Image (spheres, rainbow, N blue to C red):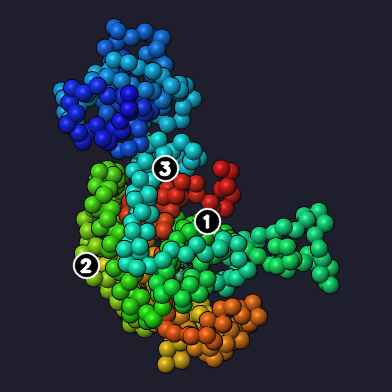
Amino acid sequence: MKSHSIKELLSSNLSLQEVTINGWVKTFRSNRFIALNDGSTINNIQCVVDFENFDEALLKKVSTGAAVKISGTLVESQGRGQSVEIQVKELVVLGVSDPDTYPIQPKKHSLEFLREKAHLRVRTNTFAAVMRVRSTLSFAVHRYFQNNGFYNVHTPIITGSDAEGAGEMFRVSTLDQKKPPLNDAGEIDFKQDFFGKETNLTVSGQLEAETYAMALGKVYTFGPTFRAENSNTSRHLAEFWMIEPEVAFNDLDANMDLAEDFIKDVINYILEHCAEDLKFLEQRLIDEEKSKPQAERSDMPLIEKLKFVAENNFKRVSYTEAIDILKSSTPNKKKKFKYIIEEWGADLQSEHERFLVEKHFKCPVILFDYPAKIKAFYMRLNDDGKTVRAMDILFPGIGEIVGGSQREERLDVLLEKIKELGIDEEELWWYLDLRKFGTAVHSGFGLGFERLVLFATGMGNIRDVIPFPRTPQNAEF
Ligand code: ATP
Ligand code: MG
Ligand code: MG
Ligand code: MG
């Protein structure tokens, strides 16, 4: 017999039909009620066992975590809160789960504990909901770009370029560890890493995406990126997924419009398609907040917050205006910023970004026209000679979610910048070629997918929105 998904059954009018389902036992109460889940929905289906008709030894094997196959009649439920339940006729235990050693018990586990069980934590309601939202968001990303005339480019994972120039790269090496080649100075010659070329895992697909935008017009890349940052924050991973659109003939204003429209579209998509999971995650937050002091509680429930972002304009503020605001502000009556901004040109710290978003403007903020000195080499220099056409999008509770810019399209200006920063011109010959052959204004941005999932799910730590987080010392499986 064809098996059904629980999601299908709970939303169907199949009452009195014979059905078969497979899933994992959440709880088995009073030797009579199995709450079964198969991952298709946050809701369990109740399966009622008439225990006199079943072998005691078989029922003993039905414990939390066991995989079972159940056939029976779908009937209207007598219990509250659910439409249908199954009167079990046939019960097969496909895989037992030892109650003494199964780590995911029906009680509530801490997120820290579950991080140690990354292979099983998706059996919990919280992680299953987060991962379903993540999957739907991923689909929404492709859907948005494909519906808007963008082509998907698969930029390389192994590359010789360091897009950001931040030196946060994982080396990719084919060198013989025991007998590495040496250079004239007697040191390991990393220039021979990749069969004769120094290589690393990509930190961003931007430079390569730019080359494709300058032929296909509108492109995006959405893939894993790697940063060897030894940072233990709740916003950084060593391996994360980045969404990077790049558009020929778009200036910074068009780039900001694109980023805002894109974010609103994907948020709307999950509001529509992940309603049950978002409701569950919202309730989870409400329960969690009850134990916090009033001042630390969020003023908006999750779904309202998502709707707010989807429906309201982001505030666009220049770096210079932001500095003026920050210089004349204190986060609250008593406290000053830990890092006081003395003068124009300083990089903003996350306390400043969060102040602007959460206290001052109380909405997502797009900061633009940053000092050239604190931004990457490829950003378009403004006529003032000291700011670049860069933008960061800052989100409540998250901080930076997007970094983008209009790219420097003028060969002479770019060459000067490269020289100033001591970047090897030869290494970027292909990138410079784009400025020689049919150069034009173009722009794009990078959005960290996990930061978007953090915002969408209301989770507090980036380690909890990716299946197997890669952070320092965390790469066992
Ligand atoms: P941050 O200031 O948070 O370190 P960044 O300015 O170094 O970020 P960009 O180079 O601008 O990051 O990358 C574009 C986007 O990628 C960021 O806006 C952010 O959403 C995401 N991102 C960057 N680094 C990480 C990381 N280590 N883990 C997860 N997401 C990241
Ligand atoms: Mg960084
Ligand atoms: Mg940054
Ligand atoms: Mg950035």
Residue placed most toward the observer, 323 or 164? 164
Q: Whole-percent x and y of residue 58? A: 40, 12
Q: Is residue 308 left or right of residue 198?
A: left
Residue 283, can we see it? no
SS at badge 1: strand
Q: Mark 3 points at which residue?
A: 111
Q: In which quarter of the image is ligand 4?
A: bottom left
Q: Mark 2 points at which residue?
A: 312
Residue placed most toward the observer, 145 or 232? 145
Type of amino acid under label 2: Asn
- Callout 2 environment at 10 Å: few (<14), some (14 to 19), or many (20+)? few
- The quarter of the picture where residue 170 lies is bottom right
- In space, the residues marked 2 and 1 are separated at their CA atoms by 32 Å
Residue in the image at 49% along x and 25% along y: 101
* Mark 2 or mark 1: whose residue is earlier in sequence: 1
For label 2, being within 8 Å of ligand 1 is answered no
Residue in the image at 41% along x and 78% along y: 248
- Callout 1 environment at 10 Å: few (<14), some (14 to 19), or many (20+)? some
Residue in the image at 25% along x and 43% along y: 276
Give the vertical position of 248 relative to 67 (above or below). Answer: below
Give the vertical position of 130 relative to 333 (above or below). Answer: above
Residue 71, can we see it? yes
Type of amino acid under label 3: Leu
Q: Whole-percent x and y of residue 340? A: 42, 75
- The quarter of the picture where residue 446 lies is bottom left
Residue in the image at 27% along x and 55% along y: 269
* Mark 1 or mark 3: whose residue is earlier in sequence: 3
SS at badge 3: helix
Q: In which quarter of the image is the C terminus?
A: top right
Label drawn at residue 239: 1
Type of amino acid under label 1: Glu
- In space, the residues marked 2 and 3 are separated at their CA atoms by 32 Å
